[in-house]
């Protein structure tokens, strides 16, 4: 996809651009809202804008409204630092197609972009990517987890952690590896916090929670069946 990233945090912008480019996206970067708006109208064939809400010159919400007002047909994925229902609703009201809450795992952004690309694509929908191990099934595009077919309600962090474990099912991951995979941009999660999130996750997964095995002195492994 041809993407425009509007993000003032240089470090995050660099890291995200690198990962997006590894996934073969073409990425333009704007460090503020005004530059972002100029690029949206100047660039031809832009597929999606990844738009931070907290920008130095204007709110990402205002940027989204301006893009919609100008009638530009482009998908908007909002990055919000505040995990509250109100901000999500406001972002969607402002014209965003979807949102990701900071701190996020790159896989989350990647899955959202795939979903936006599918929506924008004419014709029949492609099959959704699903990760499974034993009784656990995770639908990345729908952000839905089920155990034996029953939905399990996970927080974004628990979801990212389970996604990382499922991607490496059967393999032992250290706490640091889990941090890198599940929350690469997060500064507020420490290796010790991984233990706490694993505990929450096991509890929420109920009988399937036992599939997350502790590898003493190393980390965790998700049993593959
Ligand atoms: Ca920001």
Image: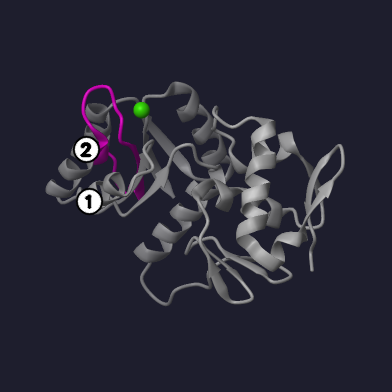
Secondary element at tag 2? helix
Q: Residue at x 67, y 56 (%)?
A: 202
Q: Position of residue 127 (x, y in %)?
A: 53, 73
Secondary element at tag 1? loop
Q: Quadrant of residue 44?
A: top left
In the picture as drawn, the residue positioned furthest to the left comes out as: 69
Q: Give the spatial CA distance, label 1 vs label 2.
A: 9 Å
What's the colour scheme? one colour
Q: Which residue is mark 2?
A: 63
In the picture as drawn, the residue positioned furthest to the right comes out as: 216
Q: Residue at x 30, y 35 (%)?
A: 53
- Specify start and end residues of the magenta stretch as a single range: 40-61
Q: Is residue 206 visible?
A: yes
Number of numbered discs: 2
User: Neighbour class for label 2 at 10 Å: few (<14), some, many (≥20)?
Assistant: many
Q: Is residue 36 found left or right of 130 in the rendered image? A: left
Q: Nearer the viewer, residue 65 or 81?
A: 81
Q: Which residue is mark 1?
A: 95
Q: Nearer the viewer, residue 35 or 82?
A: 82
The residue at label 2 has a CB less than 8 Å from ligand 1: no
Q: Quadrant of residue 65?
A: top left
Q: Is residue 101 found left or right of 176 in the rendered image? A: left
Q: Which image quadrant: the C terminus?
A: bottom right
Query: Is residue 44 one of those drawn in magenta?
Result: yes
């Amino acid at each position: 996809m041809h993407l425009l990233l509007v993000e003032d945090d240089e470090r995050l912008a660099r890291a995200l651009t690198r990962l997006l480019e590894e996934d073969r996206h073409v990425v333009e970067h704007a460090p503020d809202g005004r530059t972002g708006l100029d690029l949206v109208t100047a660039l031809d064939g832009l597929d999606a804008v990844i738009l931070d809400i907290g920008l130095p010159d204007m709110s990402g919400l205002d940027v989204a409204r301006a893009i919609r007002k100008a009638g530009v047909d482009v998908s908007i994925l909002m990055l919000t630092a505040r995990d509250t229902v109100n901000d999500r609703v406001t972002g969607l009201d402002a014209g965003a197609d979807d949102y990701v809450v900071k701190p996020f795992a790159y896989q989350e952004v990647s899955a959202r972009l795939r979903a936006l690309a599918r929506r924008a694509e004419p014709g029949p929908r492609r099959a959704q990517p699903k990760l499974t191990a034993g009784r656990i099934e995770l639908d990345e595009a729908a952000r839905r987890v089920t155990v034996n077919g029953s939905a399990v309600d996970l927080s974004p962090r628990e979801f990212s952690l389970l996604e990382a474990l499922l991607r490496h099912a059967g393999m032992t991951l250290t706490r640091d590896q889990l941090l890198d995979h599940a929350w690469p941009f997060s500064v507020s999660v420490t290796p010790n916090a991984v233990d706490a999130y694993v505990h929450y996750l096991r509890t929420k997964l109920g009988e399937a929670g036992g599939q997350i095995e502790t590898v003493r002195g190393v980390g965790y492994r998700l049993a593959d069946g």
